[in-house]
Amino acid sequence: MTIVIIMGVSGSGKTTVGKRLAEALDWQFIDADDLHSPENVEKMSRGIPLDEGDRHPWLMAMRQQISAWLQQDKNVVLACSALKQSYREILDCPLEPIKLVYLKGSQAVIEERMRSRSEHFMSPDLLNSQFEALEEPTPEEAIHLDVSLPISEIVERIVSLLKGLA
């Protein structure tokens, strides 16, 4: 069993890549945004960054979910920002069955993407706070992929790398 966490700032393509990867592998897909409280969603939709008190229950809910998947031997793709090292530690990212994929891109490219989407609650105005909070994982901690690559190529690379790690 493997859990792949697709991480990066809002607008980096976590959900799109995660859904396509889960489809390609025939695994379950979960978006961590769905685990936010209604209060967190409301705050972010108004352009207010979450504080540590807002994030902690959300991270703990994901940790519990990851533990359940591991106990159930489920293969899952989880789209989650996981911006800080401390958040990734809460999610147990250093554990062997958890693979971290970091979608990396410039702020300009990601901001352009965010401004072109209308269906997401996250305000593009919060992108600065996302980049300020971001603690990039090292190449030893995560697979780094450029967000400017075509989605199909990103997914193919992840599948290939996962097969190489098995």
Image (tube, helix red, strand yellow):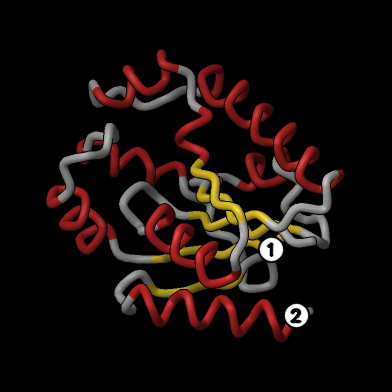
Rendered image quadrant of residue 68: top right
Q: Residue at x 27, y 32 (%)?
A: 121
Quadrant that contains the C terminus: bottom right
What whole-number distance in Å separates the C-alpha atoms at marks 1 and 2? 10 Å
In the rendered image, which residue does mark 2 sit on? Answer: 165
Q: Residue at x 57, y 50 (%)?
A: 78
Quadrant that contains the N terminus: bottom right
- Name the one closer to the observer, 140 or 91: 91
Q: Is residue 37 above or below residue 118?
A: above
**Circle 1: is it few (<14), some (14-19), or many (20+) Cα within 10 Å?**
many
Q: Amino acid at mark 1?
A: Lys
Q: Is residue 80 above or below residue 121?
A: below
Q: Secondary structure at mark 1?
A: strand
Question: Does 165 sit left or right of 146 as displayed?
Answer: right
Rendered image quadrant of residue 133: top left
Q: Pointers 1 and 2 in contact (CB under 8 A)?
A: yes
Question: Does 47 sit left or right of 132 as displayed?
Answer: left
Rendered image quadrant of residue 95: bottom right
Give me the disc on residue 99.
1
Residue 5 x, y percent position in the rendering = 60, 55
Q: Secondary structure at mark 2?
A: helix
Residue 115 x, y percent position in the rendering = 14, 48
Q: Residue at x 36, y 47 (%)?
A: 10
Residue 134 x, y percent position in the rendering = 47, 49
Residue 48 x, y percent position in the rendering = 30, 22
Give me the disc on residue 123.
none
Q: Residue at x 43, y 55 (%)?
A: 14
**Circle 2: is it few (<14), some (14-19), or many (20+) Cα within 10 Å?**
few
Q: Earlier in the sequence, mark 1 or mark 2?
A: 1
